[in-house]
Amino acid sequence: MPDTNVSPDTSAMPQSWPAGISRVPFWLYQDPEILRAEQRKIFEGPAWHFLCLEVEIENTGDYRTTAVGDMPVIVVRGENGAIHAFENRCAHRGALIAFANRGTVKDFTCVYHAWRYDLKGNLCSVAFQRGVAGKGGMPEDFRVEDHGPRKLRAETIGGLVFGTVDPAAPSLEDYLTPPIAAKIRRVFNRKLEVIGRFTQTLPNNWKLYAENIRDTYHASLLHLFFTTFRITRFNQAGGVTISEDGAHHASATIGRMEASDDVYKQQNIRSDDDEFRLNDPSFLDAVAEFGDDIQLQNVALFPATMLQQLHNSIAVRQTVPRGTDSMDLNWTFVGFADDTPDMRRRRLRQGNLAGPAGFVSMEDGCIGGFVQRGVAAASGENGVVEMGGRDATSMATRATEASVRGFWKAYRGLMGI
Amino acid sequence: MSAELLFRLSALNTAYAAAIDSDRLEVWPDFFVEDCLYKVTTAANHADGLAAGVIYADSRGMLMDRIAALRKANIYEPQAYRHLIGMPSILGHDAAGIHCETPFFVARIMRDGATTLFATGRYLDCLRDDGALRFVERIVVCDSSRFDTLLAIPL
Ligand code: FES
Ligand SMILES: [Fe+2]
């Protein structure tokens, strides 16, 4: 961590950054050069990125296309259960090797000039390599082994497939660290089933969403659904777990699940005021399915993966930057293969809590845009991130911005600024 | 008979659109039977048989709660819709009701005046006719799998 202001040499922006992690300069959300540097140092650096679910590529040849930042990626089930991931870029002229969202193939043939790749991403043949009727063809010394898209390492945890571009990255398990890996396994503990996929386009820099998901301070202040309808219990315990390097975060809200009627009896301060009662609170009737009293758990993995358990609504979110002031948020809602019909219905109903229309997530769709617009003329100013101190360590409260500081700690480390 | 039904369905959709577009959201649940299903999903999810919705309400109470949340709890920039709802195709009748499919366009008008095409798609409807037509099911299948910023007001 630098202890003086630093100025990366890549931009015309007023790039100073006070030392430490309790100030966040606004040019970070605006500078196209920093976005390019993030692609090189973070997305293609020694970090791991969610690619897909194992159940989405169950059989040999099943593939999905995804993205690691700007990099288009193919993730595919190979022989004997192996999972391969490689850049979705033909080694010939650079066309996408696969342009569908998913499919099942024996091998990949680029549509442009029919160069062919095996499931590991190795180039295996070049159309007309020997020419036609003795004319044309590739030079004698052309070797298919010398050409191919960049390969990613793929590893899994809890049925989630992650990839890293950097051969020097630690193993996925070491990257996540044991406390965070345990939070993932707590929820993702058996065979998954996809129940819905949605993409939300947010009008803000991807880092504003990375901060938002780690910002436990805002939850009860911006999202008023639970408090308005008297659902939050004042004695709910919880806290945040932050990995040593600051990169990863898990927040938990702990409380015993109770039938909605009881919850209302005990909590409804204005018990005779129907205006503040839900007509059908039964959608919040949750079942403790993970052997504990954690009602809400949000895990944020550096840089761009988030795992949500809101009662029985479980989802994976992936952020993909689309320029300095736009990003895609890809939601994959899941259940488990062994869900009863009742449990599945519960997940569908509790799905109303999150997503682009989520009762407690809708605001996160616009709040990043409010910041992006608010700081338009303030590239030389800084945001203040001091709630709960100036460092980034686990805390037994959610009234803290420790995890936001953790993000910047990891970010400054990887970016070298 | 069929011409009259077509006319009544079109009139219903016109009233439905007018209620939403003129911000009379409190009457929106009245277009549904008590034991209804209202879901906003995408063509891709629908084709894949994936059941989750961006909004998933399987009781009229949940529709009322959706509106109550928009009015009292949720925070979003002022915005309005303009629905253009096409001619319904009547697909058939069965014990559940009348089945039809109807295309729609929805423009979104933001606080600053920016008007954009927010969603296109089709309503997959099942309606009960007990003098008045009401939705047993309205599945909103958006053509795109992408939602811009957020979905607050129902489609
Ligand atoms: S670009 Fe792929 S074969 Fe030419
Ligand atoms: Fe939030």
Image: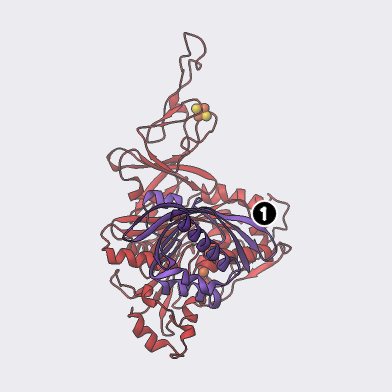
Chain colours: A red, B purple
Question: Which of these two is toward me, A166 or A72?
Answer: A72
Q: Give above or below for A26 relative to A47.
A: below
Instruction: Left or right? Give the position of A403 relative to A203.
Output: left
Q: Give above or below for A115 relative to B17.
A: above
Any part of residue A19 in sight: no
Question: Which of these two is toward me, B107 or B137?
Answer: B137
- Give me the residue at 52% from left, 67% from top: A362
Labels in figure, total: 1
Q: Give above or below for A268 relative to A306.
A: below
Kindly state the secondary structure of the residue where label 1 is placed.
Answer: loop
Quadrant (top left, top right, bottom left, bottom right) of the C terminus of chain A: bottom right
Q: Quadrant of residue A348?
A: bottom left
Instruction: Left or right? Give the position of B16 relative to A54.
Output: right
Q: Residue B32: x percent and y percent?
A: 43, 68
- Give me the residue at 46% from left, 18% from top: A129
Q: Residue B138: x percent and y percent?
A: 43, 61
- Give me the residue at 49% from left, 76% from top: A225
Q: Give above or below for A23 relative to A259.
A: above
Quadrant (top left, top right, bottom left, bottom right) of the N terminus of chain A: bottom right
Residue lying farthest front? B1
Dot 1: chain letter: A
Question: Which of these two is toward me, B24 or A197?
Answer: B24
Q: In the image, is the residue at mark 1 within 8 Å of ligand 2 by its beta carbon?
A: no
Residue position marked by numbered label 1 in the rendering: A31
Residue lying farthest top? A134
Q: Amino acid at mark 1?
A: Asp
Q: Residue A311: x percent and y percent?
A: 37, 71
Instruction: Left or right? Give the position of B81 relative to A355.
Output: right
- Give me the residue at 34% from left, 73% from top: A286
